[in-house]
Image (cartoon, rainbow, N blue to C red):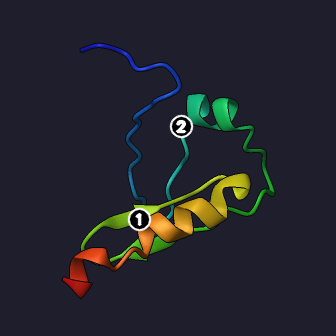
Amino acid sequence: MNELEGKYAWTATVGEKGQIVIPKQARDVFGIKPGDTLFMFGDEEKGIVIPRKTSLGELFEVVFDDKEEKK
């Protein structure tokens, strides 16, 4: 599998209390520290996204894009 620069994929396991652990490499890459607040957006068809604070506006448009529904 070819690596794409700046692109990553990780898995996380959901615990009994619904908590997930963000993989260490992901925390390091994105500078996530204990006590940070993360945003989560969800769409029942497209899934869940956890954006960086600096990308919220752009990602909000992508996650909630209704182009397909308006056709």
Is tag 2's residue or tag 1's residue first in the polypeptide sequence?
2
Q: Quadrant of residue 51?
A: bottom right
Q: Residues within 10 Å of mark 1 (few under 14, many from 20)?
A: few
Q: Viewer-proximal residue, 18 or 7?
A: 7
Indicate the amino acid at tag 1: Ile
Helix, strand or loop for disc 2: loop
Whole-Å distance between the Cαs marked 2 and 1?
17 Å
Residue at x 72%, y 44% (from the top left corner):
32
Which residue is the site of mark 1? 48
Quarter occupied by the N terminus: top left
When the figure is inspected, residue 11 is found, relative to residue 6, above or below; the finding is below
Q: Is residue 70 left or right of residue 33?
A: left
Helix, strand or loop for disc 1: strand
Residue at x 37%, y 16% (from the top left corner):
3
Residue farthest to the left, as pictured: 71
Residue at x 50%, y 69% (from the top left corner):
61
How far across and how far down the image is residue 35, in percent?
Answer: 81, 57
Q: Say whether residue 17 is visible.
A: no
Which residue is the site of mark 2? 23
Q: Quadrant of residue 22?
A: top right
